Image (cartoon, rainbow, N blue to C red):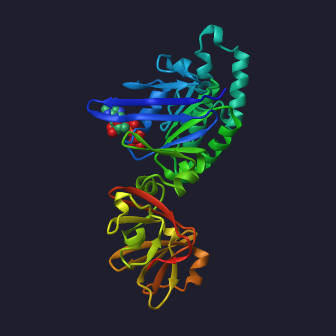
Amino acid sequence: MAGHVSIHNVSRRFGAFAALNDVSLDIPAGELVALLGPSGSGKTTLLRIIAGLDFPDSGQVLINGEDNVARHPRERGVGFVFQHYALFRHMTVAGNVAFGLQVRPRGQRPSKAEIKARVAALLDLVQLGWLADRYPIELSGGQRQRVALARALAIEPRLLLLDEPFGALDTKVRKELGQWLRDLHHGQAITSLLVTHDQAEALELADRIVLMSQGKVEQIGTPAELYTRPASPFVLEFLGEANRIPCVIGEGGLALLAVSGHALAQSVEPGQAFASPGAVLTLYVRPHDLVLEARSDGPAVVRAIKVAGAFAKIELMLGELALTALTPLHRLPSLHLQEGSRARLIAAQGMSFSAAGAGGSVQFEAPRALVMA
Ligand SMILES: Nc1ncnc2c1ncn2[C@@H]1O[C@H](COP(=O)(O)OP(=O)(O)OP(=O)(O)O)[C@@H](O)[C@H]1O
Protein backbone atom coordinates (compact mmCIF):
# COMPACT_ATOMS: atom_id res chain seq x y z
CA MET A 1 0.00 0.00 0.00
CA ALA A 2 1.28 3.43 -0.89
CA GLY A 3 2.37 5.61 2.00
CA HIS A 4 0.44 8.67 3.15
CA VAL A 5 2.98 11.01 4.70
CA SER A 6 1.93 13.60 7.20
CA ILE A 7 4.41 16.02 8.70
CA HIS A 8 3.35 18.12 11.68
CA ASN A 9 5.29 21.17 12.88
CA VAL A 10 8.72 19.67 12.31
CA SER A 11 11.70 21.80 13.39
CA ARG A 12 15.38 20.90 13.26
CA ARG A 13 18.26 23.06 14.43
CA PHE A 14 21.96 22.60 13.95
CA GLY A 15 23.42 24.68 16.80
CA ALA A 16 21.83 28.11 16.49
CA PHE A 17 20.85 27.54 12.86
CA ALA A 18 17.25 26.55 12.06
CA ALA A 19 17.47 24.14 9.10
CA LEU A 20 13.72 23.41 9.36
CA ASN A 21 11.36 25.85 10.98
CA ASP A 22 7.90 24.50 11.87
CA VAL A 23 7.27 22.59 8.65
CA SER A 24 3.85 20.99 8.14
CA LEU A 25 2.99 19.04 5.04
CA ASP A 26 0.53 16.41 3.88
CA ILE A 27 1.42 14.07 1.04
CA PRO A 28 -1.45 11.87 -0.16
CA ALA A 29 -0.65 8.23 -0.94
CA GLY A 30 0.42 7.56 -4.50
CA GLU A 31 1.63 11.06 -5.37
CA LEU A 32 4.97 12.00 -6.85
CA VAL A 33 5.97 15.10 -4.93
CA ALA A 34 9.00 17.28 -5.61
CA LEU A 35 10.75 19.05 -2.74
CA LEU A 36 12.14 22.05 -4.54
CA GLY A 37 14.16 24.99 -3.29
CA PRO A 38 17.50 26.75 -3.40
CA SER A 39 20.62 25.23 -1.92
CA GLY A 40 20.45 25.15 1.87
CA SER A 41 16.65 25.52 2.07
CA GLY A 42 16.30 22.30 4.10
CA LYS A 43 15.15 19.77 1.47
CA THR A 44 17.67 17.07 2.32
CA THR A 45 17.22 17.61 6.05
CA LEU A 46 13.46 17.05 5.64
CA LEU A 47 14.01 13.96 3.49
CA ARG A 48 16.46 12.49 6.00
CA ILE A 49 13.96 13.02 8.83
CA ILE A 50 11.19 11.31 6.84
CA ALA A 51 13.63 8.48 6.13
CA GLY A 52 14.48 8.09 9.80
CA LEU A 53 18.14 8.92 9.22
CA ASP A 54 17.80 12.10 11.29
CA PHE A 55 15.40 13.27 13.99
CA PRO A 56 13.40 16.47 14.47
CA ASP A 57 13.88 18.57 17.61
CA SER A 58 10.12 18.90 17.70
CA GLY A 59 7.19 17.78 15.58
CA GLN A 60 5.95 14.50 14.17
CA VAL A 61 6.26 12.46 10.99
CA LEU A 62 3.39 10.04 10.39
CA ILE A 63 3.43 7.41 7.65
CA ASN A 64 -0.02 5.89 7.14
CA GLY A 65 -0.98 7.45 10.45
CA GLU A 66 1.84 5.83 12.43
CA ASP A 67 4.48 7.86 14.19
CA ASN A 68 7.63 7.10 12.32
CA VAL A 69 10.19 8.60 14.64
CA ALA A 70 10.48 5.60 16.93
CA ARG A 71 10.81 3.04 14.16
CA HIS A 72 14.08 1.67 12.86
CA PRO A 73 14.69 2.87 9.28
CA ARG A 74 14.65 -0.72 8.04
CA GLU A 75 11.12 -1.20 9.37
CA ARG A 76 9.71 1.89 7.75
CA GLY A 77 9.14 0.47 4.28
CA VAL A 78 11.19 3.25 2.72
CA GLY A 79 13.39 2.98 -0.38
CA PHE A 80 16.20 5.46 -1.08
CA VAL A 81 18.03 6.66 -4.15
CA PHE A 82 20.78 9.25 -3.75
CA GLN A 83 22.68 11.43 -6.15
CA HIS A 84 25.90 9.48 -5.93
CA TYR A 85 25.31 5.94 -6.98
CA ALA A 86 25.89 4.15 -3.73
CA LEU A 87 25.99 0.74 -5.39
CA PHE A 88 28.13 -1.98 -3.86
CA ARG A 89 31.17 -2.10 -6.10
CA HIS A 90 32.05 -5.71 -5.38
CA MET A 91 28.55 -6.98 -6.24
CA THR A 92 27.03 -7.53 -9.67
CA VAL A 93 23.97 -5.62 -10.79
CA ALA A 94 21.76 -8.57 -9.79
CA GLY A 95 23.59 -8.86 -6.45
CA ASN A 96 22.97 -5.18 -5.72
CA VAL A 97 19.26 -5.48 -6.44
CA ALA A 98 18.93 -8.66 -4.36
CA PHE A 99 20.76 -7.19 -1.36
CA GLY A 100 17.80 -5.64 0.48
CA LEU A 101 15.94 -8.95 0.36
CA GLN A 102 18.90 -11.12 1.33
CA VAL A 103 19.61 -9.17 4.51
CA ARG A 104 16.08 -9.60 5.84
CA PRO A 105 15.71 -11.64 9.02
CA ARG A 106 15.13 -15.35 8.33
CA GLY A 107 11.38 -15.38 8.90
CA GLN A 108 10.75 -12.51 6.43
CA ARG A 109 13.30 -13.46 3.82
CA PRO A 110 11.91 -14.80 0.53
CA SER A 111 13.35 -18.10 -0.77
CA LYS A 112 16.36 -18.03 -3.10
CA ALA A 113 14.13 -18.80 -6.08
CA GLU A 114 11.71 -16.00 -5.14
CA ILE A 115 14.58 -13.52 -4.77
CA LYS A 116 15.94 -14.55 -8.15
CA ALA A 117 12.56 -14.10 -9.81
CA ARG A 118 11.98 -10.71 -8.17
CA VAL A 119 15.41 -9.44 -9.18
CA ALA A 120 14.78 -10.53 -12.79
CA ALA A 121 11.40 -8.78 -12.80
CA LEU A 122 12.90 -5.57 -11.37
CA LEU A 123 15.76 -5.55 -13.85
CA ASP A 124 13.19 -5.95 -16.63
CA LEU A 125 11.27 -3.03 -15.19
CA VAL A 126 14.33 -0.79 -15.37
CA GLN A 127 15.27 -2.35 -18.73
CA LEU A 128 18.60 -3.67 -17.57
CA GLY A 129 18.08 -7.44 -17.57
CA TRP A 130 20.91 -7.81 -20.07
CA LEU A 131 23.37 -6.25 -17.63
CA ALA A 132 22.54 -8.47 -14.62
CA ASP A 133 26.04 -9.96 -14.37
CA ARG A 134 28.01 -6.75 -14.82
CA TYR A 135 29.67 -4.79 -12.04
CA PRO A 136 28.79 -1.13 -11.31
CA ILE A 137 32.10 0.07 -12.75
CA GLU A 138 31.08 -1.39 -16.13
CA LEU A 139 27.91 0.74 -16.33
CA SER A 140 27.13 4.28 -17.50
CA GLY A 141 25.95 6.85 -14.93
CA GLY A 142 22.34 6.56 -16.11
CA GLN A 143 22.45 2.77 -15.93
CA ARG A 144 23.83 2.92 -12.39
CA GLN A 145 20.99 5.19 -11.31
CA ARG A 146 18.47 2.74 -12.77
CA VAL A 147 20.12 -0.10 -10.84
CA ALA A 148 19.94 2.06 -7.70
CA LEU A 149 16.22 2.52 -8.37
CA ALA A 150 15.65 -1.22 -8.90
CA ARG A 151 17.50 -1.87 -5.65
CA ALA A 152 15.34 0.63 -3.79
CA LEU A 153 12.15 -0.93 -5.21
CA ALA A 154 13.21 -4.51 -4.32
CA ILE A 155 11.94 -4.24 -0.75
CA GLU A 156 8.53 -3.10 -2.09
CA PRO A 157 8.65 0.20 -0.22
CA ARG A 158 5.48 2.20 0.34
CA LEU A 159 7.56 5.31 0.13
CA LEU A 160 10.39 6.06 -2.27
CA LEU A 161 12.76 8.88 -1.33
CA LEU A 162 14.98 10.29 -4.05
CA ASP A 163 17.64 12.91 -3.28
CA GLU A 164 18.83 14.59 -6.48
CA PRO A 165 18.92 11.13 -8.09
CA PHE A 166 19.92 12.47 -11.49
CA GLY A 167 22.04 15.37 -10.27
CA ALA A 168 25.32 13.97 -11.57
CA LEU A 169 24.04 13.14 -15.07
CA ASP A 170 24.09 15.23 -18.23
CA THR A 171 20.95 17.11 -19.25
CA LYS A 172 19.71 14.68 -21.90
CA VAL A 173 20.08 11.54 -19.77
CA ARG A 174 18.65 13.42 -16.82
CA LYS A 175 15.52 14.31 -18.80
CA GLU A 176 15.06 10.78 -20.11
CA LEU A 177 15.46 9.22 -16.68
CA GLY A 178 13.09 11.77 -15.20
CA GLN A 179 10.30 10.86 -17.64
CA TRP A 180 11.03 7.24 -17.10
CA LEU A 181 10.81 7.68 -13.30
CA ARG A 182 7.47 9.38 -13.71
CA ASP A 183 6.05 6.49 -15.77
CA LEU A 184 7.51 3.98 -13.36
CA HIS A 185 6.04 5.80 -10.37
CA HIS A 186 2.56 5.80 -11.87
CA GLY A 187 2.75 2.05 -12.51
CA GLN A 188 3.49 1.26 -8.84
CA ALA A 189 1.43 1.64 -5.68
CA ILE A 190 3.98 3.94 -4.17
CA THR A 191 4.44 7.49 -2.89
CA SER A 192 7.58 9.17 -4.18
CA LEU A 193 9.37 12.20 -2.79
CA LEU A 194 11.96 13.72 -5.05
CA VAL A 195 14.42 16.35 -3.81
CA THR A 196 15.62 18.64 -6.56
CA HIS A 197 16.88 22.18 -7.00
CA ASP A 198 16.03 22.04 -10.72
CA GLN A 199 12.74 23.83 -11.27
CA ALA A 200 12.24 22.44 -14.80
CA GLU A 201 12.58 18.90 -13.46
CA ALA A 202 10.03 19.57 -10.70
CA LEU A 203 7.57 21.25 -13.08
CA GLU A 204 7.77 18.38 -15.56
CA LEU A 205 7.70 15.41 -13.24
CA ALA A 206 5.82 16.17 -10.07
CA ASP A 207 2.11 15.84 -9.29
CA ARG A 208 2.73 18.47 -6.66
CA ILE A 209 5.61 20.71 -5.71
CA VAL A 210 6.63 21.74 -2.20
CA LEU A 211 8.71 24.87 -2.62
CA MET A 212 11.02 25.52 0.30
CA SER A 213 13.06 28.52 1.35
CA GLN A 214 15.15 29.01 4.48
CA GLY A 215 13.73 26.02 6.32
CA LYS A 216 10.11 26.92 5.60
CA VAL A 217 7.50 25.85 3.08
CA GLU A 218 6.80 28.79 0.76
CA GLN A 219 4.00 27.15 -1.23
CA ILE A 220 2.54 23.73 -1.97
CA GLY A 221 0.58 23.07 -5.14
CA THR A 222 0.47 21.52 -8.58
CA PRO A 223 3.10 22.77 -11.01
CA ALA A 224 0.41 24.81 -12.80
CA GLU A 225 -0.77 26.40 -9.54
CA LEU A 226 2.72 27.44 -8.52
CA TYR A 227 3.52 28.78 -11.95
CA THR A 228 0.31 30.72 -12.57
CA ARG A 229 -0.65 31.65 -8.99
CA PRO A 230 2.59 32.08 -7.08
CA ALA A 231 1.97 32.91 -3.43
CA SER A 232 4.95 35.25 -3.23
CA PRO A 233 7.54 36.96 -5.42
CA PHE A 234 10.02 34.34 -4.21
CA VAL A 235 7.91 31.55 -5.78
CA LEU A 236 7.42 33.53 -8.96
CA GLU A 237 11.09 34.27 -9.40
CA PHE A 238 12.20 30.79 -8.46
CA LEU A 239 9.95 29.20 -11.10
CA GLY A 240 11.21 30.87 -14.23
CA GLU A 241 12.36 34.30 -15.25
CA ALA A 242 10.48 37.53 -14.62
CA ASN A 243 10.90 41.17 -15.54
CA ARG A 244 10.65 43.52 -12.57
CA ILE A 245 8.85 46.72 -13.45
CA PRO A 246 8.22 49.53 -10.95
CA CYS A 247 4.61 50.48 -10.53
CA VAL A 248 2.74 53.04 -8.39
CA ILE A 249 -0.76 53.08 -7.03
CA GLY A 250 -2.73 56.04 -8.31
CA GLU A 251 -5.99 57.55 -7.06
CA GLY A 252 -8.82 55.01 -6.98
CA GLY A 253 -6.51 52.04 -6.43
CA LEU A 254 -5.29 51.95 -10.00
CA ALA A 255 -1.90 50.32 -10.53
CA LEU A 256 0.12 52.50 -12.89
CA LEU A 257 3.32 51.56 -14.61
CA ALA A 258 5.85 53.94 -13.08
CA VAL A 259 7.78 54.33 -16.31
CA SER A 260 4.82 55.20 -18.52
CA GLY A 261 1.88 56.09 -16.30
CA HIS A 262 -0.44 53.67 -18.11
CA ALA A 263 -3.13 52.10 -15.92
CA LEU A 264 -2.94 48.36 -15.56
CA ALA A 265 -5.77 47.34 -13.28
CA GLN A 266 -8.48 48.56 -10.97
CA SER A 267 -8.51 45.50 -8.82
CA VAL A 268 -5.78 46.26 -6.33
CA GLU A 269 -7.78 45.91 -3.14
CA PRO A 270 -8.29 49.11 -1.22
CA GLY A 271 -7.37 49.15 2.45
CA GLN A 272 -4.12 47.25 2.04
CA ALA A 273 -1.21 49.33 3.24
CA PHE A 274 0.83 48.82 0.11
CA ALA A 275 -2.11 49.66 -2.13
CA SER A 276 -2.74 53.22 -0.93
CA PRO A 277 -2.18 56.05 -3.43
CA GLY A 278 1.50 56.73 -3.97
CA ALA A 279 2.56 53.25 -2.79
CA VAL A 280 5.28 51.70 -4.88
CA LEU A 281 4.97 48.13 -6.14
CA THR A 282 7.19 45.92 -8.20
CA LEU A 283 5.33 44.30 -11.05
CA TYR A 284 6.57 40.90 -12.21
CA VAL A 285 5.98 40.00 -15.84
CA ARG A 286 7.26 36.81 -17.42
CA PRO A 287 9.22 37.32 -20.65
CA HIS A 288 6.73 35.29 -22.70
CA ASP A 289 3.87 37.47 -21.40
CA LEU A 290 5.39 40.69 -22.73
CA VAL A 291 3.76 41.36 -26.08
CA LEU A 292 5.64 43.76 -28.34
CA GLU A 293 4.18 45.90 -31.09
CA ALA A 294 6.55 47.64 -33.49
CA ARG A 295 5.76 51.39 -33.57
CA SER A 296 8.00 54.24 -34.57
CA ASP A 297 6.70 56.28 -31.58
CA GLY A 298 6.95 53.35 -29.11
CA PRO A 299 8.76 54.07 -25.84
CA ALA A 300 10.87 50.87 -25.79
CA VAL A 301 13.98 50.30 -27.92
CA VAL A 302 15.20 46.85 -29.00
CA ARG A 303 18.83 46.37 -27.93
CA ALA A 304 19.43 42.82 -29.10
CA ILE A 305 17.63 39.77 -30.46
CA LYS A 306 19.13 36.43 -29.46
CA VAL A 307 17.96 33.13 -30.86
CA ALA A 308 18.04 30.21 -28.41
CA GLY A 309 16.59 27.01 -29.84
CA ALA A 310 12.91 27.43 -30.69
CA PHE A 311 12.65 30.86 -29.05
CA ALA A 312 13.92 34.35 -29.71
CA LYS A 313 14.88 36.48 -26.74
CA ILE A 314 14.33 40.17 -27.35
CA GLU A 315 16.22 42.53 -25.06
CA LEU A 316 14.71 45.99 -24.70
CA MET A 317 15.28 49.25 -22.87
CA LEU A 318 12.29 51.14 -21.57
CA GLY A 319 13.95 54.34 -20.45
CA GLU A 320 16.53 53.11 -17.94
CA LEU A 321 14.77 49.80 -17.43
CA ALA A 322 16.13 46.67 -19.11
CA LEU A 323 13.42 44.17 -20.11
CA THR A 324 13.34 40.80 -21.81
CA ALA A 325 10.60 39.41 -24.03
CA LEU A 326 10.44 35.87 -25.35
CA THR A 327 8.69 34.81 -28.52
CA PRO A 328 8.53 31.55 -30.49
CA LEU A 329 11.08 31.82 -33.26
CA HIS A 330 8.52 31.34 -36.01
CA ARG A 331 6.63 34.43 -34.81
CA LEU A 332 9.68 36.66 -34.89
CA PRO A 333 9.34 37.78 -38.57
CA SER A 334 5.74 38.91 -38.01
CA LEU A 335 6.87 41.25 -35.20
CA HIS A 336 8.96 43.34 -37.64
CA LEU A 337 11.56 44.06 -35.01
CA GLN A 338 15.30 44.47 -35.36
CA GLU A 339 18.02 45.94 -33.22
CA GLY A 340 17.22 49.63 -32.79
CA SER A 341 13.48 49.20 -33.53
CA ARG A 342 11.01 51.00 -31.31
CA ALA A 343 8.06 49.17 -29.81
CA ARG A 344 5.29 49.52 -27.30
CA LEU A 345 4.38 46.93 -24.70
CA ILE A 346 0.96 45.34 -24.53
CA ALA A 347 -0.56 43.20 -21.81
CA ALA A 348 -2.90 40.63 -23.33
CA GLN A 349 -6.42 40.31 -21.95
CA GLY A 350 -6.48 37.95 -18.98
CA MET A 351 -2.76 38.23 -18.47
CA SER A 352 -2.02 37.79 -14.83
CA PHE A 353 0.25 40.21 -13.01
CA SER A 354 1.97 39.68 -9.72
CA ALA A 355 2.95 42.76 -7.81
CA ALA A 356 4.65 43.11 -4.48
CA GLY A 357 5.21 46.06 -2.18
CA ALA A 358 6.29 46.71 1.37
CA GLY A 359 3.03 45.39 2.82
CA GLY A 360 2.57 42.19 0.84
CA SER A 361 1.84 40.96 -2.64
CA VAL A 362 -1.16 41.01 -4.91
CA GLN A 363 -2.24 39.36 -8.14
CA PHE A 364 -4.54 40.84 -10.73
CA GLU A 365 -5.54 40.22 -14.30
CA ALA A 366 -5.64 42.58 -17.23
CA PRO A 367 -9.41 43.08 -17.79
CA ARG A 368 -8.78 43.71 -21.51
CA ALA A 369 -5.77 44.16 -23.77
CA LEU A 370 -3.85 47.09 -22.27
CA VAL A 371 -1.05 49.28 -23.41
CA MET A 372 1.61 49.05 -20.71
CA ALA A 373 4.08 51.46 -22.20
N1 LIG B 1 24.73 18.01 10.05
C1 LIG B 1 24.65 19.33 9.90
N2 LIG B 1 25.30 20.18 10.73
C2 LIG B 1 25.18 21.51 10.58
N3 LIG B 1 24.45 22.12 9.63
C3 LIG B 1 23.78 21.33 8.78
C4 LIG B 1 23.84 19.90 8.86
N4 LIG B 1 23.07 19.39 7.87
C5 LIG B 1 22.56 20.46 7.21
N5 LIG B 1 22.98 21.62 7.75
C6 LIG B 1 22.61 22.96 7.30
O1 LIG B 1 21.21 23.04 7.19
C7 LIG B 1 20.81 23.76 6.03
C8 LIG B 1 19.89 22.92 5.17
O2 LIG B 1 20.64 21.88 4.59
P1 LIG B 1 20.01 20.86 3.56
O3 LIG B 1 21.06 19.88 3.19
O4 LIG B 1 18.74 20.33 4.12
O5 LIG B 1 19.68 21.82 2.34
P2 LIG B 1 19.19 21.46 0.87
O6 LIG B 1 17.99 22.30 0.63
O7 LIG B 1 19.04 20.00 0.72
O8 LIG B 1 20.42 22.01 0.02
P3 LIG B 1 21.17 21.42 -1.29
O9 LIG B 1 20.24 21.65 -2.44
O10 LIG B 1 22.40 22.27 -1.36
O11 LIG B 1 21.45 19.98 -1.00
C9 LIG B 1 22.09 24.17 5.34
O12 LIG B 1 22.39 25.51 5.65
C10 LIG B 1 23.14 23.23 5.92
O13 LIG B 1 24.41 23.84 5.95
Q: Position of residue 90 (x, y in %)?
A: 53, 26
Residue 273 visible here: yes
User: Which residue is pictured at 36% across the width and 30% down the height?
Assistant: 12
Judging depth in this view, the residue of 163 and 143 nearest the camera is 163
Q: Residue furthest top?
A: 107
Judging depth in this view, the residue of 337 and 353 nearest the camera is 353
Quadrant location, the C terminus: bottom left
Q: Is residue 331 above or below residue 127?
A: below
Q: Quadrant of residue 13?
A: top left
User: Which residue is pictured at 72% across the width and 18% down the height?
Assistant: 114
Labels in figure, total: 0
Q: Position of residue 319 (x, y in %)?
A: 34, 80
Q: Quadrant of residue 48?
A: top left
Residue 139 visible here: no
Quadrant location, the N terminus: top right
Q: Position of residue 212 (x, y in %)?
A: 43, 43
Specify the quarter for ligand 1.
top left
Give the side of residue 216 with respect to residue 71, left or right: left
User: Which residue is pictured at 47% across the width and 69% down the height?
Assistant: 266
